[in-house]
Amino acid sequence: MSPKKDNKIKDNKIKDGPKKEGRKKDSKKKNKLDKKIEVKDSGSGLGLFAKKDLKKDAVIGRIKGKIVSDAKHDPRYVMELGNDMLLVPKAPFRFLNHSCRPNCELFDWDDETPDPETGVKGLYLGVIRKVKAGAELTIDYSWPADFAIPCQCGSKKCRGYIVAEEERHLIA
Ligand SMILES: [Zn+2]
């Protein structure tokens, strides 16, 4: 019944930090996602782009998708929810690309009650640096070294591979 502890996927860690506290919950019920972001060709497949300037600490929206507990999922296609649960994101968030210097991150709310069935909270995309209209939104995939592929994010601090910083040394 309980999910396997081995083969644990360490990608897409939910980030904790002071940045989260600066965020404000959107009181408006209406989903204005399509006013903030759009899916476009990024030059290497589809990507998620800002349709308007986005401030640091802005909350883009909740990431919807299928919640699964099978740790055998390819970490490249899932987001970690904690509690050994994973999220297989649906569009538009499934098109989020990686950068070694991302402008967004995944987070959850401290005061949100976990879902009684899955034991996990909602996962949200938040802005960590000012984003100009038209810029691509990115997160740090932090993949395990076993799944790393060459990175072409172009940032000055590019690790050379899409890989977690702490596993970078495992790649020759
Ligand atoms: Zn990179």
Image (cartoon, helix red, strand yellow):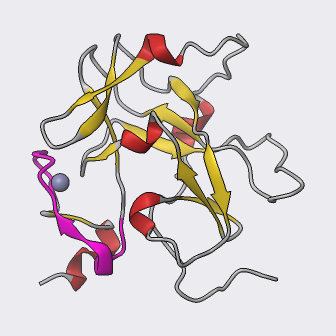
Q: Position of residue 31 (x, y in %)?
A: 62, 16
- Outermost residue, right side: 116
Quick one: quadrant of the N terminus?
bottom right
Left or right relative to 28: residue 147: left
Q: Residue at x 44, y 15 (%)?
A: 36
Left or right relative to 137: residue 122: right
What range of the chain is rendered magenta? 143-158
Magenta stretch, main secondary structure, is loop
Residue 84 included in the magenta stretch of the image: no
Q: Position of residue 39 (x, y in %)?
A: 34, 27
Name the quarter showing ligand 1. Answer: bottom left
Q: Residue at x 71, y 80 (%)?
A: 3
Q: Is residue 129 depicted above or below 95 in this figure?
A: above
Give the quarter of the image for residue 169: bottom left
Give the quarter of the image for residue 109: top right
Q: Nearer the viewer, residue 155 or 86?
A: 86
Q: Position of residue 6 (x, y in %)?
A: 58, 89
Q: Nearer the viewer, residue 115 or 13?
A: 115
- Outermost residue, bottom side: 6
Q: Nearer the viewer, residue 123 or 21?
A: 123
Q: Is residue 91 depicted above or below 164 in this figure?
A: above
Give the quarter of the image for residue 25: top right
Quick one: quadrant of the C terminus?
bottom left
Q: Residue at x 69, y 43 (%)?
A: 122
In this rendering, the count of numbered labels is 0
Q: Residue at x 35, y 10 (%)?
A: 52
Q: Position of residue 81 (x, y in %)?
A: 63, 58
